[in-house]
Amino acid sequence: MRHRATAGAAGFVQFHAANGAGATLNVNGLGDIPLYCYGGSWA
Amino acid sequence: MPIGLLGTNQIARVAYNVASGAYWLLDLDYSSVQAVSGVSVVGFPDIPAGINHLECDFALSPSANGGVFGLQVYGAGGVLDTTAANQFCTINTGAGGVISNTGFSTTLPLNTNTVDNGNAGLKAGFGAQNIQAAEYTAFNFRAAYHRPATA
């Protein structure tokens, strides 16, 4: 992904490791951003 | 997000949600996959309020004989329930209805006499339905009590 600031902008990401609790995603060095999945709500 | 939903080098589609300040992981069902070794506890933290039914399957090898393999749950207040009076096991004999007992200590025992000799283990699982209701959480447990070294 080239940016993150646009709502709904989607892209594909390859994850370097299996996720633990409280997973985050850091795109283009913009910092650790929480990563949510849907289980009745986004969390 | 559940532990182990994503594996190493997995590719997935995400979208950034401004309101929550988070990436949303798309196209994947809610699931937690964990491969652990040498641990005494496996946890499934932060199950969202939108999850009402659970299915859990596992295979394990105990490290010692005679251990208690049990199950514990957190209540609505986020506190681990270790009250002995809250741990019940029931069995349906098919003849006289359901037999219930209580008096277990801090955990719901699924197997109270585990066997370790390098050849034996447990392939088992449980289901739990309607877990968000303000009721006792009920688990339906099933097990095959061996893991032979050879077929």
Image (cartoon, coloured by chain):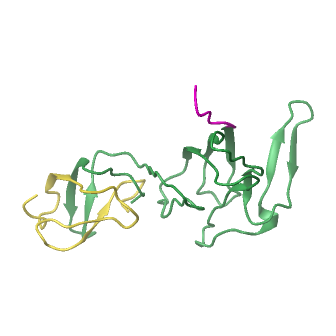
Chain colours: A yellow, B green
Task: Tell me residue B88's x, y (percent).
Answer: 79, 55
Q: Is residue A27 above or below residue A37?
A: below
Task: Tell me residue B129's x, y (percent).
Answer: 61, 47
Q: Main secondary structure of the magenta part?
A: loop
Q: Nearer the viewer, residue A20 or A33?
A: A20
Task: Tell me residue B31's x, y (percent).
Answer: 43, 49
Q: Is residue B1 above or below residue A33?
A: above
| Residue at the right extreme, as displayed | B96
**Residue at x-position 23% and y-position 72%:** A32
**Residue at x-position 13% and y-position 65%:** A4
**Residue at x-position 62% and y-position 33%:** B148
Quadrant housing the C terminus of chain B: top right
Asked whether residue B125 is drawn in magenta, I would say no
| Residue at the left extreme, as displayed | A2
- How many marks overall? 0
| Residue at the top extreme, as displayed | B151
Quadrant housing the N terminus of chain B: bottom left
Which image quadrant is residue B93 in? top right
Task: Tell me residue B3's x, y (percent).
Answer: 42, 58
**Residue at x-position 64% and y-position 42%:** B122
Judged left or right of residue B117, residue B48 is: left
Which image quadrant is residue B25 in? bottom left
Which image quadrant is residue B81 in? bottom right
Judged left or right of residue B13, residue B122 is: right
Judged left or right of residue A10, residue B42 is: right
Asked whether residue B148 is drawn in magenta, I would say yes
The magenta-colored residue range is B144-151
